[in-house]
Protein backbone atom coordinates (compact mmCIF):
# COMPACT_ATOMS: atom_id res chain seq x y z
CA UNK A 1 0.00 0.00 0.00
CA UNK A 2 2.82 2.42 0.87
CA UNK A 3 4.50 1.68 -2.48
CA UNK A 4 1.25 2.47 -4.29
CA UNK A 5 0.81 5.76 -2.37
CA UNK A 6 4.40 6.78 -3.11
CA UNK A 7 3.92 6.00 -6.81
CA UNK A 8 0.72 8.03 -7.00
CA UNK A 9 2.33 10.89 -5.05
CA UNK A 10 5.17 11.09 -7.59
CA UNK A 11 2.63 11.29 -10.41
CA UNK A 12 0.68 14.02 -8.59
CA UNK A 13 3.82 16.08 -7.97
CA UNK A 14 4.86 15.71 -11.63
CA UNK A 15 1.46 16.94 -12.79
CA UNK A 16 1.60 19.87 -10.36
CA UNK A 17 5.00 20.91 -11.73
CA UNK A 18 3.66 20.68 -15.29
CA UNK A 19 0.66 22.84 -14.38
CA UNK A 20 2.97 25.40 -12.76
CA UNK A 21 5.09 25.61 -15.93
CA UNK A 22 2.04 25.90 -18.19
CA UNK A 23 0.28 28.52 -16.05
CA UNK A 24 3.48 30.60 -15.92
CA UNK A 25 4.26 30.30 -19.63
CA UNK A 26 0.75 30.96 -20.94
CA UNK A 27 0.74 34.48 -19.54
CA UNK A 28 4.20 35.22 -20.90
CA UNK A 29 3.33 33.83 -24.33
CA UNK A 30 0.14 35.92 -24.52
CA UNK A 31 2.14 39.09 -25.23
CA UNK A 32 4.37 41.67 -23.60
CA UNK A 33 3.34 41.75 -19.93
CA UNK A 34 5.05 45.09 -19.33
CA UNK A 35 2.97 46.75 -22.08
CA UNK A 36 -0.21 45.12 -20.77
CA UNK A 37 0.47 46.30 -17.22
CA UNK A 38 1.46 49.83 -18.22
CA UNK A 39 -1.49 50.25 -20.58
CA UNK A 40 -1.76 50.89 -24.33
CA UNK A 41 -1.27 54.66 -24.01
CA UNK A 42 1.98 54.46 -21.98
CA UNK A 43 5.25 55.67 -23.38
CA UNK A 44 8.22 53.44 -24.11
CA UNK A 45 9.98 54.79 -21.00
CA UNK A 46 7.02 53.87 -18.81
CA UNK A 47 6.90 50.36 -20.30
CA UNK A 48 10.61 49.90 -19.68
CA UNK A 49 10.24 51.13 -16.10
CA UNK A 50 7.48 48.57 -15.50
CA UNK A 51 9.62 45.84 -17.05
CA UNK A 52 12.50 46.57 -14.67
CA UNK A 53 10.19 47.06 -11.65
CA UNK A 54 8.58 43.63 -12.03
CA UNK A 55 11.74 41.83 -13.11
CA UNK A 56 10.47 41.16 -16.61
CA UNK A 57 13.84 42.11 -18.09
CA UNK A 58 15.49 39.02 -16.59
CA UNK A 59 15.77 35.61 -18.34
CA UNK A 60 12.50 33.69 -18.41
CA UNK A 61 13.98 30.74 -16.47
CA UNK A 62 15.06 33.02 -13.64
CA UNK A 63 11.60 34.57 -13.52
CA UNK A 64 9.98 31.12 -13.38
CA UNK A 65 12.12 29.74 -10.56
CA UNK A 66 11.72 32.92 -8.53
CA UNK A 67 7.94 32.77 -9.03
CA UNK A 68 7.81 29.05 -8.20
CA UNK A 69 9.88 29.52 -5.05
CA UNK A 70 7.61 32.31 -3.89
CA UNK A 71 4.51 30.24 -4.76
CA UNK A 72 5.77 27.38 -2.58
CA UNK A 73 5.84 29.88 0.28
CA UNK A 74 2.29 30.96 -0.70
CA UNK A 75 3.61 34.34 -1.75
CA UNK A 76 2.04 35.32 -5.08
CA UNK A 77 2.83 39.01 -4.83
CA UNK A 78 0.35 41.87 -4.92
CA UNK A 79 -2.67 42.34 -7.14
CA UNK A 80 -2.39 44.99 -9.85
CA UNK A 81 -6.07 45.94 -9.64
CA UNK A 82 -7.38 45.07 -6.15
CA UNK A 83 -4.47 46.74 -4.32
CA UNK A 84 -3.77 43.96 -1.86
CA UNK A 85 -1.78 40.77 -1.59
CA UNK A 86 -2.98 37.89 -3.74
CA UNK A 87 -3.18 35.50 -0.78
CA UNK A 88 -5.43 37.92 1.12
CA UNK A 89 -7.82 37.97 -1.84
CA UNK A 90 -7.77 34.19 -2.19
CA UNK A 91 -8.24 33.71 1.56
CA UNK A 92 -11.40 35.85 1.38
CA UNK A 93 -12.85 34.21 -1.74
CA UNK A 94 -11.82 30.54 -1.48
CA UNK A 95 -14.22 29.58 1.39
CA UNK A 96 -17.20 30.71 -0.70
CA UNK A 97 -16.17 28.54 -3.64
CA UNK A 98 -15.43 25.55 -1.41
CA UNK A 99 -18.82 25.90 0.27
CA UNK A 100 -20.56 26.09 -3.09
CA UNK A 101 -18.64 23.09 -4.44
CA UNK A 102 -19.32 21.02 -1.33
CA UNK A 103 -23.05 21.75 -1.39
CA UNK A 104 -23.26 21.01 -5.12
CA UNK A 105 -21.41 17.70 -4.75
CA UNK A 106 -23.56 16.65 -1.79
CA UNK A 107 -26.70 17.40 -3.79
CA UNK A 108 -25.38 15.50 -6.82
CA UNK A 109 -24.45 12.42 -4.77
CA UNK A 110 -27.70 12.37 -2.76
CA UNK A 111 -29.80 12.48 -5.94
CA UNK A 112 -27.63 10.59 -8.45
CA UNK A 113 -26.77 7.46 -6.42
CA UNK A 114 -30.39 6.54 -5.56
CA UNK A 115 -31.36 7.19 -9.20
CA UNK A 116 -28.54 4.92 -10.38
CA UNK A 117 -29.57 2.17 -7.94
CA UNK A 118 -33.25 2.36 -8.98
CA UNK A 119 -32.30 2.38 -12.68
CA UNK A 120 -30.27 -0.82 -12.19
CA UNK A 121 -32.90 -2.61 -10.09
CA UNK A 122 -35.72 -1.71 -12.50
CA UNK A 123 -33.69 -2.13 -15.68
CA UNK A 124 -35.50 -1.45 -18.98
CA UNK A 125 -38.56 -0.02 -17.19
CA UNK A 126 -39.92 3.53 -17.18
CA UNK A 127 -37.85 4.23 -14.05
CA UNK A 128 -34.65 3.29 -15.88
CA UNK A 129 -35.60 5.39 -18.90
CA UNK A 130 -36.54 8.37 -16.73
CA UNK A 131 -33.18 8.20 -14.92
CA UNK A 132 -31.29 8.01 -18.21
CA UNK A 133 -33.30 10.95 -19.56
CA UNK A 134 -32.29 13.01 -16.50
CA UNK A 135 -28.65 12.10 -17.19
CA UNK A 136 -28.84 12.96 -20.90
CA UNK A 137 -30.53 16.31 -20.26
CA UNK A 138 -27.99 17.17 -17.57
CA UNK A 139 -25.10 16.41 -19.91
CA UNK A 140 -26.54 18.25 -22.91
CA UNK A 141 -27.83 21.39 -21.17
CA UNK A 142 -25.37 24.32 -20.83
CA UNK A 143 -24.74 25.16 -17.19
CA UNK A 144 -25.16 28.91 -17.63
CA UNK A 145 -28.54 28.43 -19.38
CA UNK A 146 -29.79 26.19 -16.58
CA UNK A 147 -28.57 28.71 -13.99
CA UNK A 148 -30.41 31.56 -15.71
CA UNK A 149 -33.56 29.42 -15.99
CA UNK A 150 -33.48 28.77 -12.25
CA UNK A 151 -33.20 32.53 -11.63
CA UNK A 152 -36.18 33.29 -13.87
CA UNK A 153 -38.37 30.60 -12.30
CA UNK A 154 -37.46 30.64 -8.59
CA UNK A 155 -36.15 34.19 -8.06
CA UNK A 156 -38.01 36.40 -10.53
CA UNK A 157 -41.20 34.38 -10.95
CA UNK A 158 -41.89 32.65 -7.64
CA UNK A 159 -39.60 34.93 -5.57
CA UNK A 160 -38.65 32.06 -3.27
CA UNK A 161 -34.89 32.59 -3.36
CA UNK A 162 -32.56 35.60 -3.81
CA UNK A 163 -31.21 36.41 -7.26
CA UNK A 164 -27.59 37.08 -6.35
CA UNK A 165 -25.09 37.31 -3.52
CA UNK A 166 -23.55 34.97 -0.96
CA UNK A 167 -24.49 36.34 2.46
CA UNK A 168 -26.87 33.56 3.57
CA UNK A 169 -27.52 29.88 2.90
CA UNK A 170 -30.47 30.81 0.67
CA UNK A 171 -28.04 32.45 -1.75
CA UNK A 172 -26.26 29.10 -2.22
CA UNK A 173 -29.35 27.03 -3.09
CA UNK A 174 -29.77 27.90 -6.77
CA UNK A 175 -26.01 27.96 -7.56
CA UNK A 176 -25.59 24.56 -5.84
CA UNK A 177 -28.48 23.09 -7.84
CA UNK A 178 -27.10 24.48 -11.12
CA UNK A 179 -23.57 23.25 -10.40
CA UNK A 180 -24.67 19.93 -8.87
CA UNK A 181 -26.85 19.02 -11.85
CA UNK A 182 -23.70 19.20 -13.97
CA UNK A 183 -22.14 16.34 -11.94
CA UNK A 184 -25.26 14.19 -11.56
CA UNK A 185 -25.27 12.41 -14.97
CA UNK A 186 -21.79 10.90 -14.65
CA UNK A 187 -22.35 9.74 -11.06
CA UNK A 188 -25.77 8.29 -11.89
CA UNK A 189 -24.57 6.39 -14.96
CA UNK A 190 -21.52 5.00 -13.15
CA UNK A 191 -23.67 3.88 -10.21
CA UNK A 192 -26.12 2.19 -12.58
CA UNK A 193 -23.35 0.42 -14.50
CA UNK A 194 -21.69 -0.74 -11.28
CA UNK A 195 -24.96 -2.02 -9.84
CA UNK A 196 -25.83 -3.91 -13.02
CA UNK A 197 -22.42 -5.58 -12.98
CA UNK A 198 -22.62 -6.50 -9.29
CA UNK A 199 -26.25 -7.69 -9.37
CA UNK A 200 -25.27 -10.31 -11.93
CA UNK A 201 -22.46 -11.70 -9.77
CA UNK A 202 -22.46 -15.18 -8.23
CA UNK A 203 -22.33 -13.96 -4.62
CA UNK A 204 -25.47 -11.89 -5.16
CA UNK A 205 -27.30 -14.94 -6.48
CA UNK A 206 -26.03 -16.87 -3.46
CA UNK A 207 -27.29 -14.19 -1.09
CA UNK A 208 -30.71 -14.31 -2.72
CA UNK A 209 -30.74 -18.12 -2.55
CA UNK A 210 -30.10 -17.91 1.20
CA UNK A 211 -33.36 -15.98 1.56
CA UNK A 212 -31.92 -12.56 2.38
CA UNK A 213 -34.33 -9.68 1.94
CA UNK A 214 -34.04 -7.69 -1.32
CA UNK A 215 -33.14 -4.52 0.59
CA UNK A 216 -30.28 -6.27 2.40
CA UNK A 217 -28.99 -7.79 -0.83
CA UNK A 218 -29.04 -4.43 -2.59
CA UNK A 219 -27.68 -2.14 0.13
CA UNK A 220 -25.39 -4.40 2.15
CA UNK A 221 -23.92 -6.59 -0.60
CA UNK A 222 -24.43 -4.96 -4.00
CA UNK A 223 -24.16 -1.21 -3.37
CA UNK A 224 -21.17 -1.65 -1.08
CA UNK A 225 -19.08 -2.94 -4.01
CA UNK A 226 -20.70 -0.92 -6.78
CA UNK A 227 -20.00 2.37 -4.99
CA UNK A 228 -16.20 2.01 -5.08
CA UNK A 229 -15.60 3.70 -8.48
CA UNK A 230 -18.06 6.46 -7.54
CA UNK A 231 -15.64 7.58 -4.80
CA UNK A 232 -12.99 8.48 -7.37
CA UNK A 233 -15.51 10.07 -9.69
CA UNK A 234 -16.96 12.24 -6.90
CA UNK A 235 -13.52 13.63 -6.10
CA UNK A 236 -12.87 14.35 -9.77
CA UNK A 237 -16.28 16.01 -10.14
CA UNK A 238 -15.56 18.25 -7.14
CA UNK A 239 -12.38 19.38 -8.88
CA UNK A 240 -14.37 20.11 -12.04
CA UNK A 241 -16.88 22.09 -9.98
CA UNK A 242 -14.18 24.27 -8.43
CA UNK A 243 -12.86 25.01 -11.92
CA UNK A 244 -16.33 25.45 -13.42
CA UNK A 245 -17.54 27.77 -10.67
CA UNK A 246 -16.41 30.76 -12.77
CA UNK A 247 -19.61 30.66 -14.83
CA UNK A 248 -21.97 29.97 -11.92
CA UNK A 249 -20.43 32.62 -9.66
CA UNK A 250 -20.65 35.15 -12.49
CA UNK A 251 -24.35 34.40 -13.08
CA UNK A 252 -25.23 34.70 -9.38
CA UNK A 253 -22.69 37.47 -8.54
CA UNK A 254 -21.05 35.36 -5.84
CA UNK A 255 -17.74 36.79 -4.66
CA UNK A 256 -15.87 33.50 -4.74
CA UNK A 257 -12.69 32.30 -6.41
CA UNK A 258 -14.42 31.89 -9.78
CA UNK A 259 -15.63 35.50 -9.79
CA UNK A 260 -12.16 36.62 -8.73
CA UNK A 261 -10.65 34.74 -11.68
CA UNK A 262 -13.11 36.35 -14.09
CA UNK A 263 -12.48 39.86 -12.76
CA UNK A 264 -8.70 39.32 -12.87
CA UNK A 265 -8.72 38.02 -16.45
CA UNK A 266 -10.84 40.94 -17.66
CA UNK A 267 -8.52 43.44 -15.95
CA UNK A 268 -5.17 41.81 -16.85
CA UNK A 269 -4.39 41.15 -13.19
CA UNK A 270 -1.70 38.55 -13.95
CA UNK A 271 -0.52 37.65 -10.42
CA UNK A 272 -4.08 36.81 -9.38
CA UNK A 273 -4.75 34.81 -12.56
CA UNK A 274 -1.61 32.73 -12.06
CA UNK A 275 -2.42 32.08 -8.41
CA UNK A 276 -6.04 31.08 -9.07
CA UNK A 277 -5.08 28.71 -11.89
CA UNK A 278 -2.39 27.08 -9.77
CA UNK A 279 -4.56 26.74 -6.64
CA UNK A 280 -7.52 25.23 -8.51
CA UNK A 281 -5.16 22.79 -10.24
CA UNK A 282 -3.58 21.80 -6.92
CA UNK A 283 -7.03 21.18 -5.44
CA UNK A 284 -8.00 19.06 -8.44
CA UNK A 285 -4.79 17.01 -8.38
CA UNK A 286 -4.98 16.60 -4.60
CA UNK A 287 -8.58 15.37 -4.77
CA UNK A 288 -7.65 12.89 -7.49
CA UNK A 289 -4.76 11.62 -5.37
CA UNK A 290 -7.02 11.17 -2.33
CA UNK A 291 -9.56 9.31 -4.48
CA UNK A 292 -6.86 6.95 -5.79
CA UNK A 293 -5.69 6.18 -2.25
CA UNK A 294 -9.26 5.59 -1.03
CA UNK A 295 -9.94 3.28 -3.97
CA UNK A 296 -6.77 1.33 -3.24
CA UNK A 297 -7.79 1.00 0.41
CA UNK A 298 -11.27 -0.22 -0.55
CA UNK A 299 -10.16 -2.49 -3.38
CA UNK A 300 -6.73 -4.20 -2.95
CA UNK A 301 -6.68 -5.07 -6.68
CA UNK A 302 -6.07 -1.38 -7.46
CA UNK A 303 -2.68 -1.47 -5.73
CA UNK A 304 -1.12 -3.61 -8.47
CA UNK A 305 -1.92 -1.12 -11.24
Image (cartoon, grey):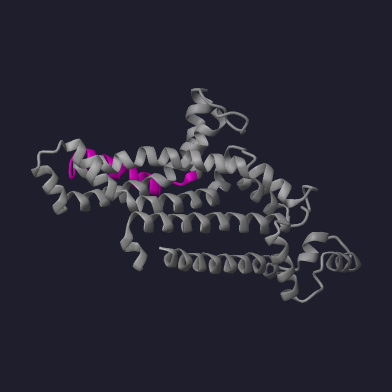
The percent position of residue 18, horizontal first and vertical second, equals 58, 69
Q: Answer with the quarter of the image where residue 162 lies.
A: top right
Picture quarter with the N terminus: bottom left
Residue 6's place in the image compared with 117, above or below, is: below
| Residue 152 visible to an observer of this rendering | yes
At 48% across and 45% down in the image, what residue appears? 143
Which SS type dominates the magenta stretch?
Answer: helix
Magenta highlight range: 123-143
At 55% across and 39% down in the image, what residue appears? 99
Task: In this rendered view, identify the residue nearer to me: 13 or 160.
Answer: 13
The percent position of residue 15, horizontal first and vertical second, equals 54, 67
Residue farthest to the right, as pictured: 45
At 37% across and 56% down in the image, what residue appears? 297
At 52% across and 59% down in the image, what residue appears? 285
Task: In this rendered view, identify the residue nearer to me: 302 or 253.
Answer: 302
Task: In this rendered view, identify the residue nearer to me: 35 or 105.
Answer: 105
The percent position of residue 265, horizontal first and vertical second, equals 67, 54
Q: Is residue 53 magenta?
A: no
The percent position of residue 74, horizontal first and vertical second, equals 70, 56
Residue farthest to the left, as pictured: 209
Amino acid sequence: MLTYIFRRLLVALSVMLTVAVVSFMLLHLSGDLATAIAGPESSAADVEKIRVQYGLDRPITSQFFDWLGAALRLDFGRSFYFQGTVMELIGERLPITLKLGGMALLLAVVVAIPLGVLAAIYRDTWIDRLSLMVAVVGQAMPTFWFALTLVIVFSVGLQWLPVAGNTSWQHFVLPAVALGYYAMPAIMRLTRAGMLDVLGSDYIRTARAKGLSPARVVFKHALRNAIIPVVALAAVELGFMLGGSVVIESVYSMQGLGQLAWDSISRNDYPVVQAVVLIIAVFYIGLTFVADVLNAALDPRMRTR
